[in-house]
Image: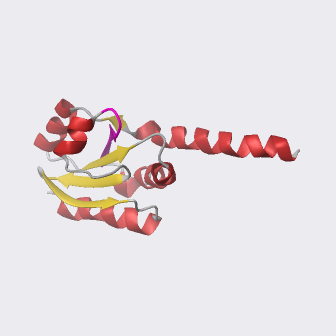
Amino acid sequence: MKSLLRWLFPLIFCLSAVAAQANWISYSQPTFDKLQDDGKPILVLVHASWCPTCRAQAPIISSLLSQKEYQGITALRVDFDTQKDVVRAFRVPMQSTLIVFTGGKEVGRSTGDTTKVGIKALLQKVLKSSP
């Protein structure tokens, strides 16, 4: 039984992280530009699949974005390992960085925050700054 639980818990954790990312869009410059032009609030997540901090952020972000208050925010995920040009353009030093934009400009960022309170405060910045 212990052996089964030892394998089952990590599997459930991984599946929940994948499900949590279901409402994220993979980053592309045209999508980002269009959202910026339209004045939409944007959350850019610089994510790495191997990063435990990113995995801890995923269910928190997903939970918040599913709340009515935050449903207008579009989440774009940047792959830290394969989208190095985008990572450099955003001047991101490491994965698990969250950046919020509205009205064509950055209004906040955090790196490594895995608290619901901290991530919620970041999302609040984008709502307060929305036109």
Toward the viewer: 82 or 69? 82
Q: Residue at x 85, y 47 (%)?
A: 2
Q: Residue 77: within the magenta? A: yes
The coloring applied to the image is secondary structure
Q: Position of residue 76 (x, y in %)?
A: 31, 41
Q: Residue at x 33, y 46 (%)?
A: 46
Q: Position of residue 55 (x, y in %)?
A: 50, 48
Q: Residue 16: within the magenta? A: no
Q: Quadrant of the C terminus?
A: bottom left
Q: Is residue 13 left or right of residue 61?
A: right
Toward the viewer: 104 or 45? 45
Dominant secondary structure (helix, strand or loop) of the stretch shown in magenta: strand
Q: What span is in magenta? A: 73-82
The number of discs equals: 0
- For the view shown, which residue lies furthest in the right direction? 1
Q: Position of residue 70 (x, y in %)?
A: 35, 54
Q: Position of residue 66 (x, y in %)?
A: 44, 49
Q: Residue at x 62, y 45 (%)?
A: 13
Which quadrant would residue 38 be assigned to in this image?
Answer: top left
Q: Quadrant of the N terminus?
A: top right
